[in-house]
Image: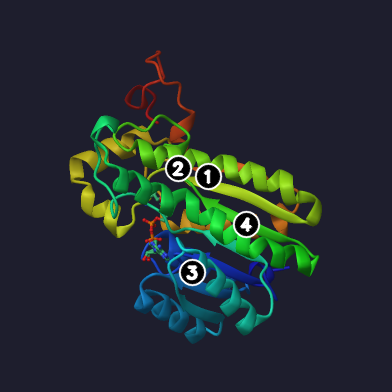
Amino acid sequence: MGIEDLLADKVAIVAGGGGGGIGAQTSRTLASAGAAVVVVDLEPERAETLREEIEGQGGRALAVTADVRTVEGAESIVEAALAAFGRIDVLVNVAGGMHQHATWRPMAEWDEPSWDGVVSINLRYIFLLARAVIPVMVRQGDGGSIINITSISGVFGAPNHAAYGAAKAGLIHLTKSLCLEYGRQGVRCNAVSPGVVETAAVADALDDARRERMHRDIPLARGGLPDDIANAVLFFASPLSAYVSGQMLLVDGGVSVRFPLGIPGGDASESGG
Ligand SMILES: NC(=O)c1ccc[n+]([C@@H]2O[C@H](COP(=O)([O-])OP(=O)(O)OC[C@H]3O[C@@H](n4cnc5c(N)ncnc54)[C@H](O)[C@@H]3O)[C@@H](O)[C@H]2O)c1
């Protein structure tokens, strides 16, 4: 089976799939593997642009404008996917982030709306969407795959963005809960945790000196690309990972494995890493 057939006849929902970074690339990658992609975004023109692009390349896509943070949004996404394609095999939860809802600061300086906003878009909506999608996957009887985009910030301490780190850590836990609760019905759930991904937004925030320092700390000597994350999503979405569930894969160029205290050879500049 070629990569272009990995998801033949499958239907994938990508929440936040119209975004310029990981979301759009995930939509493209799943479509290029043969899936019909339901591109969900809060911004109608983003979802529509991706739909046109995928269909222009001979793929199948549907653009859905919805707010994934609401019960109505989650239900409308499932209804639209079933009306267009008749089934749902894959759910990828990409929408997330912090800067739309809060600025970096120590926890005592957070206000409740910022905290709730960050938790809503990084954790709570995945509960709503999974709750709407799982009964469909279970009813179909031939399995399903849910993939949550978390973050390296959910794995390590996350100063000045505690709500984001806590929500992403919660999402890693939710991933394990879904694995345990629905594995017997064929539904798998895994998480992909990016390190830094040099999307346009991240690139704008990095000056040359910071980028260089960051690349020096990363064993693979570069920031991640949306493609790197989308390829990991494709693995979890496809039968290549048929016996993998409840797992969290760090896609971070190896930065997370370094011993944190200074030891000879442990420093990136000493080891040339
Ligand atoms: N870029 C990084 O360095 C990095 C690192 C670690 C984790 N992540 C995670 O990767 C994911 C994608 O990040 P990205 O920066 O590539 O974003 P992206 O460019 O993929 O954009 C996400 C999309 O989600 C949409 N969206 C936002 N709120 C929505 C809502 N309520 N309903 C429907 N759609 C909504 C936005 O309109 C946007 O188009 C996030 O979960 C983020 O936390 C990113």
Residue for badge 4: 146
Residue 237 x, y percent position in the rendering: 64, 59
Q: Nearer the viewer, residue 51 or 210?
A: 51
Q: Quadrant of ligand 1?
A: bottom left
Residue 73: assigned label = 3
Could you tell me how far apart the alpha carbons at marks 1 and 2 are, in whole angstroms? Answer: 6 Å
Q: Nearer the viewer, mark 3 or mark 1?
A: 3
Ligand 1 under 8 Å from disc 3 Cβ: yes
Structural crowding at the residue carrying mark 4, measured as other residues with C-alpha within 10 Å and reported as few (<14), some (14–19) or many (≥20) = many
The amino acid type of the residue labelled 2 equals Ala
Could you tell me how far apart the alpha carbons at marks 4 and 2 are, in whole angstroms? Answer: 17 Å
Locate the C terminus by quadrant. Answer: top left
The amino acid type of the residue labelled 1 equals Leu
Q: Quadrant of residue 104?
A: top left
Ligand 1 under 8 Å from disc 1 Cβ: no
Ligand 1 under 8 Å from disc 2 Cβ: no
Tell me which residue sits at (63%, 54%) in the image.
236
**Secondary element type, mark 1:** helix
Tell me which residue sits at (44%, 63%) in the image.
23
Q: Mark 4 near mark 2, Cβ–Cβ under 8 Å? A: no
- Vertical relation: 3 (above or below) 185: below
Mark before the other along the chain sequence, 3 or 2: 3
